């Protein structure tokens, strides 16, 4: 079984599913901010964090939204994560009151890097794999480490052969 490609154990997420799970994440974060429950800003980790960051900021009525660009993967190959674009320094401070949102945590390397920069921020992802769980404060759904999560922005509807094929 170990000769399977990573995508053969796949968790396929539809637009509808990411919308529901993004909303569930927002509702879980509601009222947990340090200023009478309020959050100062949402920061999405591009690019995967932008969709859940939008959903969370919409649900929690947070109008201040910024981004941090961290690149960790070339397709499914992991490389050392590095910051390509930082959010506004005056907004971020040490991260107090900032909700950092990403689509998923896998090895935890991306969040580890962002956490070092903003140690007081709250880190939230929609999905989490076990290795990355220590890096995330709030998440919705856990999947096993050997599952590859496919997001709707990386997929298209496609014809599939019937189970009972021609041969
Ligand atoms: O916990 P880790 O092992 O660091 O992996 C998680 C990160 O990897 C993916 O981003 P990627 O770097 O592929 O960039 P993208 O969001 O632009 O697709 C994903 O969106 C997370 O940000
Ligand atoms: O399971 C995954 N799916 C999509 N992107 C990712 N980046 C790290 N792990 C994953
Ligand atoms: Mg990402």
Image: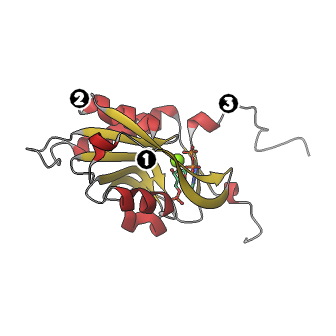
Which of the numbered marks, if any, corresponds to residue 157?
3
Q: What kind of element bears circle 3?
A: loop
**Residue under the image location 76 percent in, 44 percent down:** 163
Q: Indicate left or right for 147 with 95 as reference.
A: right
Residue farthest toward the right in the current orientation of the protein: 167
Q: Would residue 135 be found to the left or right of residue 3 on screen?
A: left
Which residue position is annotated with label 1? 102
Disc nearest the viewer among 1 and 3 = 1
**Which residue corresponds to mark 2?**
61
Q: How many residues crowd mark 2 within 10 Å: few (<14), some (14–19), many (20+)?
A: few
Q: Position of residue 114 (x, y in %)?
A: 41, 56
Residue drawn 30% across and 28% down? 58
CA separation in Å, label 2 and label 1: 18 Å
The mark nearer the N terminus, 3 or 2, is 2
Q: Is residue 46 above or below residue 8?
A: above
- Which quadrant holds residue 67? top left
Give the secondary structure at mark 2. Answer: loop
Mark 2 or mark 1: whose residue is earlier in sequence: 2
Q: Secondary structure at mark 1?
A: strand
Q: Is mark 1 within 8 Å of ligand 1?
A: yes
Residue 154: % across, % down: 63, 38
State the residue in front, 105 or 88. 88
């Amino acid at each position: 079984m170990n000769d399977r490609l990573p995508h053969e154990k796949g968790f396929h997420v539809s637009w509808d599913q990411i919308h529901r799970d993004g909303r569930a994440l927002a509702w879980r974060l509601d009222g947990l901010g340090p200023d009478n429950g309020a959050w100062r800003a949402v920061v999405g980790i591009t690019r995967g964090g932008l969709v859940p960051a939008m959903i969370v900021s919409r649900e929690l009525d947070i109008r201040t939204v910024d981004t941090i660009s961290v690149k960790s993967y070339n397709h499914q190959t992991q490389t050392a994560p590095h910051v390509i674009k930082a959010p506004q320094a005056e907004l971020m401070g040490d991260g107090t009151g900032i909700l950092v949102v990403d689509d998923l945590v896998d090895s935890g390397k991306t969040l580890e890097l962002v956490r070092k920069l903003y140690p007081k921020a709250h880190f939230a992802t929609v999905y989490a794999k076990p290795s990355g769980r220590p890096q995330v404060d709030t998440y919705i759904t856990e999947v096993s480490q050997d599952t590859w999560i496919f997001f709707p922005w990386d997929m298209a509807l496609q014809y599939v052969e019937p189970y009972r094929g021609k041969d």
